[in-house]
Amino acid sequence: MLGIKDIFSILDSQDMTVKSETVLLKNAVGRILINPVISTIDSPPFDKAAMDGWAVRGGDEKGPWELAETIAAGEIASRALRPGKCTAIMTGAKIPRGCGKIIRIEYTRQDEKTVFLETKEPLQNIIFKGENIKTGERVLEPRRLTPGDIGILASLGRTEIEVAQMPRIGIITTGSELTEPGEILEVGEIFNSNGPQLMAQAEAAGCPAQYYGITIDDERLLYDTISKALKENYILLLSGGVSMGQFDFVPGTLEKLGVKKNFHKAAIKPGRPIWFGRNETCFVFGLPGNPVSTYILFEVFVKHLIYKYCSLDYRPYSLRAVLGKTIKRKTSDRSEFLPVQFKDERIYPVSYNGSSHLNAMSEADGLIILEQGVEKVIEGETVHVRLL
């Protein structure tokens, strides 16, 4: 069976066409920037005061000074500074000609029109033209835009930005035992958590998503639902029905619909029955029905494909942490994604009863990967944590 690296290699080998669209800056947070942003201005566009204080000439820093005028942010001095003179200046204001330093107010005292130095000013307190960003400088590289990035773009005068079109994702849950939250739960039934969970994960990834509801274990109904979803989406996610049971109809139905299989089953835990394939217009993931499997496989593999569609290598946030408790495994024939949480500056596995124990994911801060063949990780060892 395939390992984790094999799956990533298959996902990375898929051909796809990246499409872009231009959106207003106010709607761009979370979207994927596909081209570098080059500044067309200097920032700041002029030499300006970094502090409220007194603008004085270079070499005329001991005082006392006669107050010549006051400059608020957005105003311009009416004259150049002369020796023995100072100008009251507010943070952000353009410094007057001849200014060599801003002396902070708290380092001085004022007597009517005269300013006296009481403590030597150690700093220049001037932000020079282009000190933060220069014209022609690459300001942002392709990435998922954060609120901070939006602020940077606004500071350059941008009102809109070109971003990747996010892939439309279709979601189908399968299983005659499922009923939707809010309905009456009959004997033998369970509430459908995978549908709402996958919708939330898709939307959190910035993708428009279409939910096709629950499809019971009926080949004809499944065929019709999948056929419709394949035509309407770029990525299709099915949960349940991908294993080897008598009513696991998903792989056979996909084959009948002309979806070419890339792989089925992988040496991973949870998620061994994972199925992946495509036709000319749609990628398909068949995910196991257990909710932890579904959650983790979306986080690790589906999200990887989403970012590839947007022409961006997905690099999840991760860090190194010290393990606070020894982890032992009964079997090590598969690589295992294990939910963990931070506590007392160390990392600990959460209480976890297997791939149906969805509560574990609400407590998890991240995942660690126990590679194939690794039976034990000792307390005190450093591990890599993939943050959720």
Image: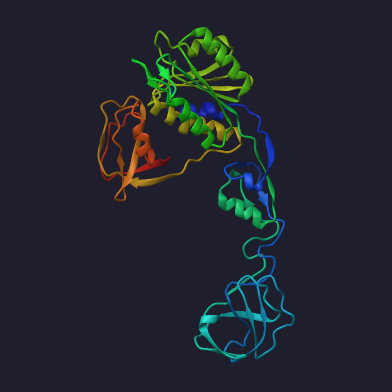
| Residue 316 or residue 49, whichever sits in front | 49
Count of marks overlaid on the render: 0
- For the C terminus, the image quarter is top left
x then y, percent, for residue 80: 72, 83
When asked about the image quadrant of residue 93, the answer is bottom right
x then y, percent, for residue 151: 61, 54
Give the residue furthest to the right.
78
**Residue 360 horizontal side relative to residue 388, left or right:** left
Q: How is the image coloured?
A: rainbow
Whether residue 369 is visible? no
Whether residue 173 is visible? yes
x then y, percent, for residue 213: 51, 20
When asked about the image quadrant of residue 217, the answer is top left
Residue 354 in the image: above or below residue 368 = above
Residue 39 in the image: above or below residue 268 = below
When asked about the image quadrant of residue 126, the answer is bottom right
x then y, percent, for residue 136: 70, 56
Residue 177 in the image: above or below residue 323 = above
- For the N terminus, the image quarter is top left
| Residue 250 or residue 185, whichever sits in front | 185
